[in-house]
Every structure is written in structure tokens, then in C-alpha cells.
Amino acid sequence: MSPQPSDLAMVPFVSVEHMMGLVHHIGIEQILADLAADIEADFRRWESFDKTPRVASHSPVGVIELMPTSDGEMYGFKYVNGHPKNTKEGLQTVTAFGLLADVDTGYPKLLTEMTLLTALRTAATSAMAAKHLAPKGAKTMAMIGNGAQSEFQCLAFKAVCGIDTVRLFDTDPAATAKAARNLSGSGLTVVSCTSGEEAMEGAEIITTCTADKQNATILTDNMVGPGVHVNAIGGDCPGKTELHRDILLRSDIFVEYPPQTWIEGEIQQLDEGHPTTELWQVITGQAEGRKDARQITLFDSVGFAIEDFSALRYILRAIQGTDFYADLDLLADPDDPRDLFGMLTRAKA
């Protein structure tokens, strides 16, 4: 039975409170594993999506971006900002919301917060990529940068890749203490470190996630030994990097969407045309991922709209039959679609 116009007029809205309830209802590690599987499935059909670099509006203190895509049946976009200075003002560095719509009618199917959901999908994407690129049997990850994303990253690598130990470091000891406290009872062995070098002792996977909008050197060349997988997720705009250029020259580099990564990723430090491999090609078997035990693999992740699309579709499915959403009266619904003015007039009466 086709939905009636009155059914289409109400749009499910997932608030922050709803999202938190849904995560606790399903379980955070289960959601991370589910999201990783859905994102991987969409990467396998990468060529069916519309793709464009995100539309960015930069200012001296941050960036506001729109991230759209469509697979021909559904259309999705995310609004997201990145303002590192917000932390000092008691505000989030990143906030976001997203919308999923039906291509056939153009009607929205879902409106949701995406601040929490972006943290979840970013972590799920990292772990999904590591499943294909990290050393087999890796158990220890160094988490460099212990801000808002760090716990999600650690739990995703546990749920998807089987990591059992995380070594934490942040230039702000309070951030490391926060992350260690939040991860207590997670089943992970958590080691708080006082330097990046200490954090990387024995780590087979290194994740960098820092917020400063600048060309920084979080990892120097001598800190990265052979055989590791580097998950660089902090770079997300022009002029913001985390790795010394020499690390890139020693690594096999894997990216999401090259036209966007060349603008925003670690590879903005390199000459354009430097060899990179698109992650979807590894997932579909069209390109090699990890080739040998001494290879350094680098996932230069800046986040891409297809990952948000996967997350939006997952949430739309997950809320069915639950109370973790509200019906939002977002769309005008006149009895006669040609009589919008008449609907307005009758409302006065």
C-alpha cells in the first residue's frame, strides 16, 4: 500500500536525547559494528553514488560545510561545522545535523542530529578501513589526541578489529584523564601516556585526531616504524595536517575521495599526482591493501558524504518500532496540492 500524502507530511526527527537513547538501547559497540558493515556495503557500490567535494565556507576561526550525495533512490546531506576555538568557550568543536530524502518525491524521510552520529560513523569508518589495512592480529592502538572523538575510535577498533589495548596521549593531560575515565569498564586495557613516543610503544595501529586548525606535526618521521597502520583523521580542511611529510613519503596512502582529500587531507603536503589508492578499490578487490609485514599503511581520512548517507539510512531503519524519534510537522500538506494559499487562509479561521 502506497503511503498517503498525510503520512508523508510528518518527518521522523531524531533529537540528541533520542540518539543517546537509541545508542544505549542497541549498545554502542553493536552500533559501531553495524555502521562499519553498512559503510563497507556502500563502499562496495561506490560507483552508484553522486560524488562531489563538500561545499565549504571557511572563516579565520573555522569552517561550515555541506556534504551531499545520492544513490539515485535516496538523497542525503549533512551540515557540519569545525571550530577548534569553541572548546575554550565551552562549546563543541564539531556540531552537525543531517537529512535523508526520497528521490522519487523529494520528500524528506528523516531529520536527525549528527553530532553524536558523526562521531559514531567516523569511528566506524576508521575501524572498517583498518580491517582491510592494519597488520593482521593487531591488538594495540595508540590514540593521539584524546578529545571528543577518541573514545568512539577506541571502542570501534575494539568492536570491529579486536583491539584490546589503547595507549592514550594528549598535550592536555586533562583530556587523557577524561578519555581514560570514560573507557574504564569497557573491556579495554587503557594506558595513559605522557608523550606521543610513549603512546606508540608496541602499537600496531596509530590514530591521530587533533583539533587545531594548523599545519601541525603530531607525528614526526622517526616516531613511525615499519609495519604499522596510521589512521589519520584530524585533517579536515586546507592548511590543517598532523603528520610530517616524510611519513607520507614512506607510506602507502589510502583515501576516500581524492578530489576532496587533496584539498583537506594529509596529502595536501605532497605534489599532486603522488600515488594514492581509493579505499573502495581495496574493499572491492580492485587494488591491494596491505602487502607485507613491513609496509606502512596510511588511511588519510577526511570524512566523505557516502559515510554520512550510510549512517542516515542506518538510523532510519534503527528507529522503526521504537520511541526514539518524534514526528515533525515539517511539510505543508494542503488537501489540494495546488491550493497552498487556501490552506493558509483556512488556518486563520
Image: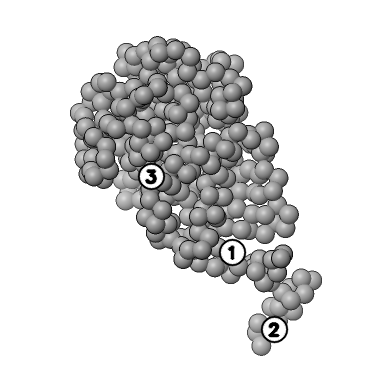
Q: Which numbered disc, 1 or 3, marks the residue closer to the eye?
A: 3
Question: In terms of secondary structure, where does tag 2 sit?
Answer: helix
Query: Residue at point 70% right, 56% down?
Result: 106
Quick check: 18 left or right of 4? left
Q: Which mark is residue 11?
A: 1
Query: Residue at point 56% right, 15% down?
Result: 275
Residue flagged by tag 3: what amino acid is it? Answer: Glu
Quick check: 325 left or right of 201? right
| Circle nearer the N terminus (3, 2) | 3
Query: Residue at point 56% right, 50% down?
Result: 313
Query: Residue at point 44% right, 19% down?
Result: 297
Q: Quadrant of residue 208?
A: top left
What residue sits right under mark 2 in the picture? 346
| Circle nearer the N terminus (1, 3) | 1
Quick check: 186 left or right of 246? left
Residue 268 or residue 34, whichever sits in front:
34
Spatial CA span between label 1 and label 3: 28 Å
Within 10 angstroms of label 2, few (less than 14), some, or many (20 or more) residues? Answer: few
Vertical placement of 141 versus 253: above or below? below
Q: Which numbered disc, 3 or 2, marks the residue closer to the eye?
A: 3
Residue flagged by tag 2: what amino acid is it? Answer: Arg
Question: In terms of secondary structure, where does tag 1 sit?
Answer: strand
Image location of residue 262, percent across then percent down: 55, 25
Residue flagged by tag 1: what amino acid is it? Answer: Val
What residue sits right under mark 3 in the picture? 29
Question: In terms of secondary structure, where does tag 3 sit?
Answer: helix
